[in-house]
Amino acid sequence: MVARTKSTFHGKDRDLYLDLVKEFPLTSIRSAKHLEEAQAVIDNLLAKGKLRKGEEWYLDALSDLVAAYEDQNCPIEAASDADMLQHLLEAKGITQAQLNRDTGIAKSAISEVLAGKKPFSRQMMRTFADYFKVDVSVLAANL
């Protein structure tokens, strides 16, 4: 039995959606090659700019399928402490010296983290989390 829902899934929008499904069916992504093909379809839709409703529905569904495949098959390693601190500095637009002045963490400790010679200490994590207004778990990914 097919469940029916009330939606605005009719007319030209539905036809556009179904045309896209015919071109590239919405099925679970099963391989790296299939993933590449799905990403190409997504890229083509995004390149169009403003999308019609049927295209948006299709893009949402295909994006969900790609995300599910990537979550299972393409794990992303946590950023190193050095990379994380560098990103936070750049995002806030400050220097190591400014971070030292604002947090009281020694310049040498900041430099060692940025050089990859030293990981965050627990105290650094708490201080940086407060300073950069991020959850401490963001900085604790490498523990």
Image (spheres, rainbow, N blue to C red):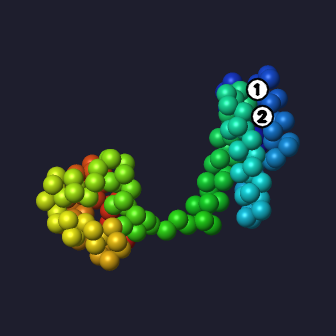
Badge 2 marks a residue whose secondary structure is: helix
Q: Residues within 10 Å of mark 1 (few under 14, many from 20)?
A: some
* Percent coordinates x, y for residue 78 in the rendering: 44, 66
- C-alpha distance separating marks 2 and 1: 6 Å
Q: Which residue in the structure is indicated by mark 2?
A: 17
Few, some or many C-alpha atoms within 10 Å of disc 2 (few <14, some 14-19, many ≥20)?
Answer: many
Residue 46, image quadrant: top right
Tell me where residue 16 appears, x and y as whole percent. 80, 30
Residue 89 located left or right of residue 68: left
Q: Considering the image in quadrants, where does the C terminus appear?
A: bottom left
As displayed, is residue 29 above or below residue 45? below
Residue type, numbered disc 2: Tyr
Q: Secondary structure at mark 1?
A: helix
Location of mark 1 (residue): 13
- Asked if residue 14 is positioned above or below residue 67 in the image, the reply reads above
Q: Nearer the viewer, residue 116 or 142?
A: 116
- The residue drawn where x is 79% and y is 22% is 11
Horizontal side of residue 71 vs 103, given as left or right: right
Quarter placement of the N terminus: top right
Q: Is residue 76 left or right of residue 65?
A: left
User: Residue 140's quadrant in the figure?
Assistant: bottom left
Q: Where residue 135 is drawn, which disc sits there?
A: none
Q: Which residue does the image show at 16% across and 66% down from the upper left?
A: 106
Give the image location of residue 108, x and y in percent: 21, 70
